[in-house]
Amino acid sequence: MYVGNNNQEKMVVRLLSGYCAIFFLLIASISSTVLHEQQATAQKTTTSSFSTTKSTPPPPPTTSNFLTYQNQNPTYGIKIQYPSDWTMSQTGLRDYTNIVAFYSPLQNLTAVPSQFLLSRTHYSQNITLNDYGKLVNATLQQPGVQIVESKPFTLGDGTPAHSIVFIPPSGSVPFKPEIMLVWTVKGSNVYTLLYNGEAAKYSFYLPTIQKMINSFEITK
């Protein structure tokens, strides 16, 4: 049975701490590539909202027109589906474990997109789903963190996984983020899928996120 050592626990702490901070950092760090690619849609939405006294909520996201992302690095051996109107980025990722990030369409010029991040952490020995879960739970046991939900489930290809939804401590931004962290394990590799966004919009993209998660496959 895997027993976490100090180095591995520190890695998980750093990973989870980074996840809690990601949402706040997005405000200042969304790359110019993402902004340029979504500028036309954002401008159109903003112009429309200025023409009325009340802003019109965006239409519900659809689950059609999904593309398949498959990393060309044979070390990772993963693939996942994502909406064609989301921005896929493999650049500007802060942690060496991160593989790819997907950003939701911008609704206006001041909006912060929701983010879906796929990562892989390699350990020197095999690790179980339950053992990694213990490290995650221990890391989240800190003041101000609110656990919304924690449950085991099965990915679309039958792989066992676990998800936890939590709200990190309040920060300096005038809105509250909500984060879903999903992990699955294969041998000595832990794959994590992170969805974070504004708590008020969390359920808006949830059907899309669930389809992305269910489509995730470890091909190697």
Image: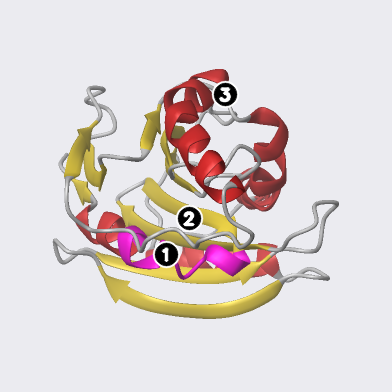
79 is higher (above) or lower (below) than 28: below
Q: In the image, what residue type sits under mark 1?
A: Met
Q: Which residues are magenta?
A: 199-209
Q: In the image, what residue type sits under mark 3?
A: Ser
Q: Nearer the viewer, residue 177 or 138?
A: 177
Magenta part mainly helix, strand or loop? helix
Q: Examine the rendering and report whether any part of residue 8 can be seen.
A: no
**Residue drawn at (21%, 63%) of the image:** 159
Q: Which residue is mark 3?
A: 31
The quarter of the image holding the C terminus is top left
The quarter of the image holding the N terminus is bottom left
Q: Position of residue 126 (x, y in %)?
A: 37, 51
Q: Is residue 214 magenta?
A: no
Q: Residues within 10 Å of mark 1 (few under 14, many from 20)?
A: few
Q: Is residue 141 left or right of residue 96?
A: right
Label ID, residue 195 = 2
Q: Examine the rendering and report whether any part of residue 207 can be seen.
A: yes
